[in-house]
Amino acid sequence: MKKAAGRKAKQRASDELRDEYRFDYSKARPNRFASRMDKGRLVVVLDPDVSEVFTTPGAVNRALRALIEAMPTTHG
């Protein structure tokens, strides 16, 4: 059975981004996956030029660890 052509065109128009969205936060629910998150991890966003060089999390961690080793330690 074929779908009506008018229905498809109407659906495409509704997929466009609007200037403003009004969310009903009263219907929001807690994230059920939050307990699975590793509390010791931190998520950061890399700038595009940096992400071209460091393409994996391991590459970023190796570079940061090397930087930490090169930093002078302060004894207070």
Image: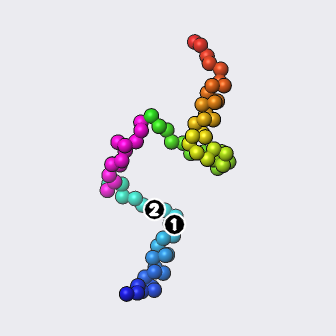
The residue at 48%/70% (across/down) is 15
Above or below residue 44? Residue 22 is: below
For the residue labelled by badge 1, is the local secondary structure a helix, a strand or a loop?
loop
Residue 17 or residue 35, whichever sits in front: 35
Asked where in the image residue 69 lies, by quadrant, the reply is top right
Residue 45: x and y in percent read 56, 45
Quadrant into which the C terminus falls: top right
Residue 34 or residue 64, whichever sits in front: 64
| Residue 30 among magenta residues | yes
Residue matched to label 2: 21
Residue 9: x and y in percent read 48, 81
Q: Which residues are magenta?
A: 27-39
- Regarding residue 47, the answer to whether it shows in the image is no
Residue matched to label 1: 17
Q: Viewer-nearest of labels 2 and 1?
A: 1
Q: Amino acid at mark 2?
A: Tyr
Quadrant into which the N terminus falls: bottom left
